[in-house]
Image (tube, grey):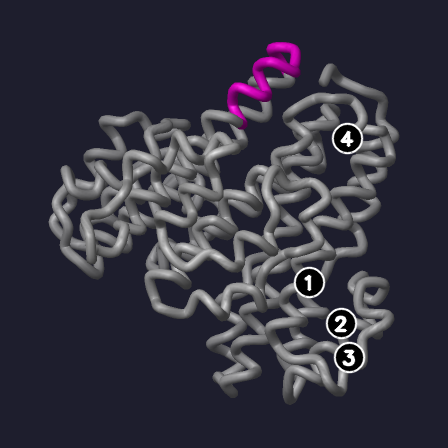
Amino acid sequence: MAKKGYATQAKIRAVYGKCLTSENYHELLRCSDVTDAAEYLKRSTHYGKTLAQIDTNTIHRGMLEVLIRRNRFEEYKRLCKFEQLFESGIEFYRYVIVESEVTEILSLMRHINAGSGDDYISTMPSYMNEYSSFDYIALAKIRDYGELLEFLKPTPYYAVLKDHIPSAGVKPKFTDIEVALRTYYFKWLLAAIRKAADKESADEIEKQIKIQIDFMNIINSYRMKKFFGMSAAEIEKDMLPFYGRLSQAKQYELYSAPDGDSFISRFSKTVYGRQMAENGIDTSNLEMSVRRMRYRYAKAVMCRSIDTSSCLYAFMYLLETEVNNIISIIEGIRYQADPKRIEALIVI
């Protein structure tokens, strides 16, 4: 995964140039229903190819979301094919697949804990089956944690989850499972980078990943403090054990804040808080501020990096953000929410 020529980076930036703009989002916000939104995406955006064979008059929200998410994976495949990255045997380029596996195991667990396991199949990304280490259709048939463990025995996820078997009649603790799986994923990802890349390239991608983890920890710990008043020790136990531009001590200082407002005040004095202030990002809505700053970091890397893997990783984050923006708008339209409230959720 050494530095390559500029062809792939130019290709990535060209694809990014077709992504949705502020104007596109405003047009989507004007749509009256899901059918109208699907038709706009089909007619006026780069999702046209994905939706080409779809009758937008009959499509429902769940299917539209699945297709939009599938488009992201198809873009990834096209970019990898451009330079035969899948065929290279480099593990790093499987990260979107491993990320999806972790996400789907967690999604199934949410449905099982909520007693809605039958609903999981409607959101399952069956198009990933060709690449996944397990069968997503078989995963969708699982109805309890014991079945899930048995199913995952041939995969690395069994070793991660086998120590989280709940007592009889007790639901597995979702937070513990999520932390365990995401910790495994990021350890795998960081190791894959170090195995495949020269030091300069690996350092560049690792910086992106650790900023991403910092922001995940900030958002989750802020929620725990603001809504549940959890102690610093309780919060730290449920955070991912990685540290980027915020040291462990600095993160613990945030977790020790007496309440949500104090958390924000302490955050404003961190390197991220100062950068947000310099960029005119208001931290009063901390979660959205963090998401917008993460988007800006990724966009800066994609625009300036000369390393294929780093540029690709940044672009996939930007495309994931676009997918989440569209889904937020579709959900808002479905529930007839105030367009201004929906617009406030858009990250760009």
Q: Quadrant of the C terminus?
A: bottom right
Tell me the crowding category of disc 3: few under 14, some 14 to 19, or many 20 or more residues within 10 angstroms, Cα based.
many
Disc 2 or 1, which lies upstream in sequence? Answer: 2
Disc 4 residue type (three-letter): Phe
Coordinates of residue 198 in the picture (x, y in percent) = 65, 11
In terms of secondary structure, where does tag 4 sit?
A: helix
| Mark 2 to mark 4 CA distance (whole Å) | 29 Å
- Span colored in magenta: 189-200
Report if residue 196 lies within the magenta region. yes
| Mark 3 to mark 2 CA distance (whole Å) | 5 Å
Disc 2 or 4, which lies upstream in sequence? Answer: 2
Q: Nearer the viewer, mark 2 or mark 4?
A: 4
Kindly identify the residue that appears in the image at 88 percent across and 30 percent down. 7
Disc 1 residue type (three-letter): Ile
Asked whether the beta carbons under mark 2 and mark 1 sit within 8 Å of each other, the answer is yes
Disc 3 residue type (three-letter): Glu
| Mark 3 to mark 4 CA distance (whole Å) | 33 Å
In terms of secondary structure, where does tag 1 sit?
A: helix
Kindly identify the residue that appears in the image at 67 percent across and 76 percent down. 28
In terms of secondary structure, where does tag 3 sit?
A: helix
Disc 4 or 1, which lies upstream in sequence? Answer: 1
Disc 3 or 4, which lies upstream in sequence? Answer: 3
Disc 3 or 1, which lies upstream in sequence? Answer: 3
| Mark 3 to mark 1 CA distance (whole Å) | 13 Å
Coordinates of residue 328 in the picture (x, y in percent) = 54, 69
326 and 178: which one is in front? 178
> Mark 3 sits on what residue?
39
